[in-house]
Amino acid sequence: MAIFGWSKSKQPTPPDPQHPGGAPKAEGAATGEKAPTEASGASAAFSPEKARSFFDRGRKLEEAGQYEYAMTMWLTGMRSDPGSIEGLEGFFRCADRFRAGGDAKASRETERLAGGSTPIDRFLTAVLSWSMNPKAPDLAVRALVAAGDLGLSEVGRWIAPKAVVVLRNEDRPRKDMALRLKEACFKVGAVELALEAATVALRVDPTDNKLAAEVKNLSAEATMSKGGYEQTGQSGGFRTNVRDIDKQRKLEEGERVVKSASVIERVLAEAKAKYQASPADKPSVLAYVKALAERGRPEDEQAALEVLDSAYQSTQEFRFRKAAGDLRIRRARRELRALRESAAATPADAGLAQRVREAEASVLRSEIGELEAQIGAYPTDLSIRFELGKRYVEAGAHERAIEQLQLSKGDARLKAQSLSMLGQAFAAMDWQDEAIDTFRQALEGVTDPGDSAGLDLRYGLLGALGRRAETDRDLPSAEEAYKLASAIAIQQIGYRDIRARRDALKALLASIRAGEAGA
C-alpha cells in the first residue's frame, strides 16, 4: 500500500521519529540532540544546517505533489530549528495543499513523527493538529500556548494573528477560549492581539467588570508598546500583521498561510488554465476551487460552487458534493454573523432580532442536512457522527444525538467531547442519573480537570447534580454540586454563569439542610 503518495518499492527512507534531530535512519546522522527553546540560550543545540537540509527536501517533495511526505520533512526540520518561520510557513503551505486534495487528517506515520512528551513534541503535535483543522479555535490556541511554553516568541507572533482570526470567525466564541488566547498572546508579546482576544471575551460576557478593567489596561499597554515588537520575518513585521487583522478575517478563515496578492493571482490564473484545459481532471478541479477560495471574492465563491456542482454531476464522487455543501454552509454562517453584528448594534430592532433567530435555525437545519448526507457517504467516519450528534443536541433532537454520540465516543480522540455532549443530551431529557454517570466517565479520561475541557465537564456534572438535588431534595448531590461550583469559581470566576450557579446551589443546600433539620 502506498504511503504519502509513494510506493513501497521506491519509498524514500522516512525520518526516524525516535531521533529528535530527525535524520533518516539510512543516513545515520541522528545525534539524539534536542532543539532548545529560544529562552534557554543553549544555541549550541540548535542545528539550522540540519533543518535546512530537511526544508530543502520538503520543498522538492512539495513541487512533486507529495504533500504529506513534504510535511514530514518540514516537521523534522523544525525539530532542529523550531524557531524557523520559514519552516512553519513551508509546513502549513504543504498541509494546506494536502487538505485541498481531499484528505481530512494526517496518517498515523506522520502523527507518530510529531508525537512525544517533551515540550518540542507537544509543540509539533499542536502544530500538526491545527494544520489539519485550521478553523478550530482550541487547536489554534493550543499551538500558540505550546510555542509560548518553548519560548518561541517570534513563532508565537506568527501564530497569534491567525488564532485571533479563527476565534473571531466563530459563530459562538467561548469566553474561556478567548481568555486562554489572551494569556497566550500576552506571553509572546502580542499585546494588541491579547487585547483583541480579551475584547471578544468581554462581548461574550459584558457583565464581567474585572475583565472590562483588564481590557482598558491592555488598551493602554498596547498603545504604549506600539512599534516595539520584533520583526516576524515578513515585510512590515508584526505590526503589519496587527493592522491587517480585519483584512485577514475577510480574506480567510484561519486556514491559509498569508500570501501576497500577486502570488494569489498567479496561482489562480495557473489553476484556472489547467482546469479549463482538462475539466474532468479531479486534481485540477480541486486546485482551481482552492485558488478561488484563496482570492475570496463573492464571484470566486459562486464560481467554485459551479465547478464543484459540475464535478459532482459528472463523477458522482461525494467529495465534490461535500465541498460544495461546506462552501454553502460557510456562506450562510457569514451572512448569519453579519446579521448578529447588525442586531448587536441595534438591540431595539425586534424585527432584526427575529431575522437572526430565523437565520440561526436555517443554518442549523442546513448543517444537519449536510452532515446526514456525509454519514450516508462515509458511515465509518466517527468525526462526522460527532458533529452530527452535536448539531442534534443544539436542535433539541436528543435521542438522535445520543445515537450518534454513542458511536463517536468509540474514537479515542473524540471520546471526551462525545461523552460531554452525551451528558448534555441526557440532562436535557431529564435523565439526570445517566447524565451524572456520563459526565463522571468523561472526567476519568481528563488529565487536567482545570483545562477548558475539564471545566466544561465539571460544569455539566454540577448542573446534573443540582437538578437531581432540587428534584429529589438529595443532600449529597447538592453538596457535591456546590463544591464543584465553588472550585470552578475559585479557578475562573468569569466562567459562564458560575457565580449565579454557585449562589443558587448555596441557597438550595441551605434549604435542604433546613428541611432535614425541621424533620
Image: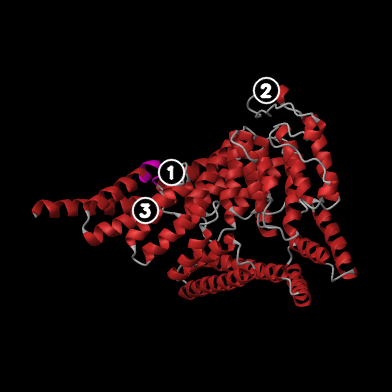
Q: Kindly state the secondary structure of the residue where label 3 is placed.
A: helix
The residue that disc 1 covers is 449
Residue at position x 47%, y 49% in the image: 453
Provide the secondary structure element on which disc 1 rests.
Answer: loop
The CA span between labels 1 and 2 is 34 Å
Which percent across, then down, holds residue 183?
A: 53, 41
Magenta part of the chain: 488-493
- Characterize the local packing of mark 2: few (<14), some (14-19) or many (20 or more) Cα atoms within 10 angstroms: few
Mark 2 is on which residue type? Ala
Query: Which residue does the image show at 22% across and 60% down from the upper left?
Result: 472
* Residue 136 appears in the rendering: yes
* Residue 515 position within the rendered picture, expressed as x and y whole percent measured from the top left: 13, 55
Residue for badge 2: 42
Judging depth in this view, the residue of 10 and 172 nearest the camera is 10
For disc 3, the marked residue is 461
Q: Which of marks 3 and 2 is nearer the N terminus?
A: 2
Observer able to see residue 228: no
Work out whether mark 1 precedes mark 2 in sequence or the reverse, and give the earlier one: 2
Q: Quadrant of residue 431?
A: bottom left
The disc at residue 4 is: none
Answer left or right for 152 relative to 424.
right
Between the residue at mark 1 and the residue at mark 3, the CA separation in whole angstroms equals 12 Å
Of residues 409 and 168, the one nearer the viewer is: 409
In which quarter of the view is residue 519 placed? bottom left
Q: First in sequence: mark 1 or mark 3? A: 1
- Nearer to us in this view, 107 or 146: 107
